[in-house]
Amino acid sequence: MSTRRILTKLLFAVAAVTVFGVSYYLGNRYARPGAAELQAFVFPDPKPLEAFRLLDKKGDPFTPASFKGHWSFLVTGNLDDERCRPLLFHYVLAWNHLAGNPKLQQQTRVVFLDMARTPRTPEQLRRFIDFYNPAFTAVTGPWETRARLARRLGVSQQALETGVGCDPENGVVGLVDPEGVLLALFTGVTDPAAIAHDLKFFQ
């Protein structure tokens, strides 16, 4: 066999190994995680949130564009429900777990979707959410707009009629990426370290 043919076969072999290696990396980098890997439920076909318009704690409009540049835990509940406290403290601790990655911590926040029947004032929202972390925000607005967004997160019609649960076991928490895509649900995830770990998976 000539030296040229040997070199040609060798080059093909190297190319094949390279393609296999790149394909393996990309397949693992972007493959959907299994239940054993993450605590969160990951949507198999995540989609952007539909258009809506609410108000945040500063009185500014809050729309899907407001998610840009942030990793947002979208929490549903009621400011009057004391069970919200332990749920939110879980996410305060999860945020603290990100201290080793300052850039990610700075990009991460809670967006509290207040499901009280009567819309709150921005000042009421601010006083409530800033107690947990000034980096977090809260939103309110017309009931039907809030209810439509809550349904997108999986809140049932019965819960909307009787009161949206806001405890660590039953509170509904969605993960929205910096492009406004709803990626996963953290409902029932009570370990702050696991919440932080799962968030890092999506980086």
Image: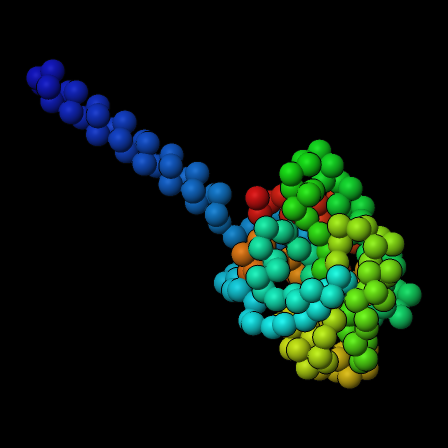
Q: Nearer the viewer, residue 20 or 126?
A: 126
Count of all numbered marks drawn on residues in the image: 0
Coloring basis for residues: rainbow
Relative horizontal placement of residue 184, taking residue 170 as reference (left or right): left
Which quadrant would the N terminus be assigned to in this image? top left
Relative horizontal placement of residue 150, taking residue 180 as reference (left or right): right
Residue 27 vs 87, above or below: the answer is: above
Q: Position of residue 130 (x, y in %)?
A: 83, 55
Q: Residue at x 71, y 33 (%)?
A: 100
Q: Residue at x 81, y 46 (%)?
A: 93
Residue 41 visible in the current orientation: no
Which quadrant would the C terminus be assigned to in this image? top right
Q: Position of residue 72 (x, y in %)?
A: 66, 55
Q: Residue at x 38, y 34 (%)?
A: 21
Looking at the image, which residue sits at the far top? Answer: 3
Q: Position of residue 129 (x, y in %)?
A: 82, 58
Q: Nearer the viewer, residue 13 or 125?
A: 125
Q: Position of residue 136 (x, y in %)?
A: 75, 54
Q: Quadrant of residue 115?
A: bottom right
Q: Quadrant of residue 149?
A: bottom right
Residue 78 visible in the current orientation: yes
Looking at the image, which residue sits at the far front? Answer: 59
Q: Quadrant of residue 84?
A: bottom right
Residue 144 vs 97, above or below: the answer is: below
Q: Residue at x 52, y 52 (%)?
A: 32
Relative horizontal placement of residue 85, taking residue 157 as reference (left or right): right
Q: Nearer the viewer, residue 42 or 62?
A: 62
